[in-house]
Amino acid sequence: MGSNSESAMQNFQRRTMIVLLVTQIVGTIGVGAAPLLGILLASEVTQNEAWAGLARTASTLGAALLGIPLGNLAARKGRRVALSSGWLIGAIGSAILVPAAQFSLTVPPFAGLLLIGSGSAVSLQSRFAATDLASPQRKGRSLSLVVWVGTIGSVLGPNLGVPGRVVGTHTGLTVYASAFLIAAACLGLASLLIFVLLRPDPLLTARAGTAAAEQPRPKHRIRVLTSGLRTSTRQRQGMLAILTAQAIMVAIMTMTPVHVVHHGGTIELVGITISMHILGMYLLAPVAGWMVDRFGYHAPMFVGIAILTASLLIGAIYPDYMPAIVASLILLGLGWSFMNVAGSALFATAVEPDLRASAQGGVDAMANLSGAIAAFIAGPLLAVSSFAALCLIALAVLVPVTVSLVRRR
């Protein structure tokens, strides 16, 4: 009987992974349109670079604001309802951007980008859903595989302007309106796939096998996260790794295009640099997951810290040498990947099953909020100092998580 139960659980996990991987690709194509096309649209309709910068913050802030409610929804109703709802909200946000782009409206683009942040939130929560039914020996690899396939959507999303031109010739829509129409279709399809195919629900199935499911504890939207952080060193360490990596990555990545253009770099060079950075973020995620399963959580975190240190030192020492900046951005993505995968896996295993979904929503919300704050602060810092100084400040941000890991060891 035990063997049959284990076999059934493996089949459930295999089906869950297939659905999550396909949905992650489709959904992140829609989400991927926001960072670049959203900024360009905001710049076009407002004729103001400052407002264009706020467009980047809007989608990140949306992910932060919606992360906790979606996590609590998962805790109450399961992953299927939460993930499908999140993708649907993102589709609505992208749909708002279609008339906003077509008629050059000023306010609706920011509302639409805020709602698209919901897609970012559930894209992050999907990596936790991959661990619900995974065996302890494969949690890291399952989580990292969902992160890894996000490469496809993250690379294709910013290029929706190309098929957008084709759609525009047949519909009369502008390029931006057509691109966000495609994005809305992708996000809507992701919502439908999750709602129809993610059965049985991985979180509810995992919870059904625990004693906690029989007598669930009362849950509070914020206390679920804060109470665990007060009592669990593993939760604190996992969260610190996630927040540190996110803040450093977003701050440097957001300011690099500005720095490159100010030093005579072309838009094409900016595009190549960001594309290489995105590949760095996702390409070796399975390797980070394998290291988590094989060597534990601390080894890949130390690797991530070492890679981030190298990235920031290169940026600080060679801020005016464009090949060095490209190399720095690639390493920045790699370091983020190792830190994020290891920190997420550690956090997922440190939280009790009946509290996991709410706590995970909370940590993702805080990660997105830290990224939004870092992007907001990085602009004035770059304006009053230099790119090299920004890299050195980011290097100082690495100190607390490094000390924490050394003491824990």
Image (spheres, helix red, strand yellow):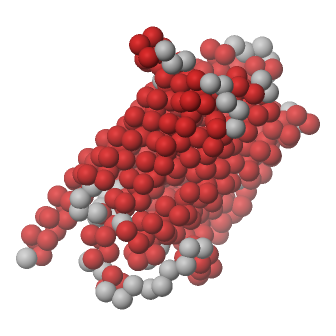
Question: Eyeballing the image, is 117 above or below 353?
Answer: above
The N terminus lies in quadrant: bottom left
Question: Eyeballing the image, is 370 above or below 210?
Answer: above
Question: Eyeballing the image, is 355 above or below 178?
Answer: below
User: In the figure, residue 13 lies in which quadrant?
Assistant: bottom left
Q: Which residue appears at 51% of the width and 37% of the height?
A: 94
Left or right position of 169 against 310: left
User: In the figure, residue 243 lies in which quadrant?
Assistant: bottom right
Q: Which residue appears at 41% of the width and 72% of the height?
A: 76
Left or right position of 366 against 6: right
Q: Is residue 314 visible?
A: no
Q: Is residue 61 visible?
A: yes
Residue 229 appears at what percent x and percent y?
60, 75
The one of 386 and 104 positioned closer to us in this rendering: 104
Q: Residue furthest right?
A: 384
Q: Residue furthest top?
A: 169
Total marks placed: 0
Residue 241 appears at what percent x and percent y?
60, 58
Left or right position of 302 against 86: right
The one of 374 and 233 positioned closer to us in this rendering: 374
The C terminus lies in quadrant: bottom right
User: In the figure, residue 230 lies in which quadrant?
Assistant: bottom right
Residue 344 appears at what percent x and percent y?
49, 58
Q: Which residue appears at 48% of the width and 85% of the height?
A: 218
Residue 55 appears at what percent x and percent y?
68, 37
The one of 248 and 25 positioned closer to us in this rendering: 25
Q: Which residue appears at 27% of the width and 77% of the height?
A: 208
Q: Residue furthest bottom?
A: 215
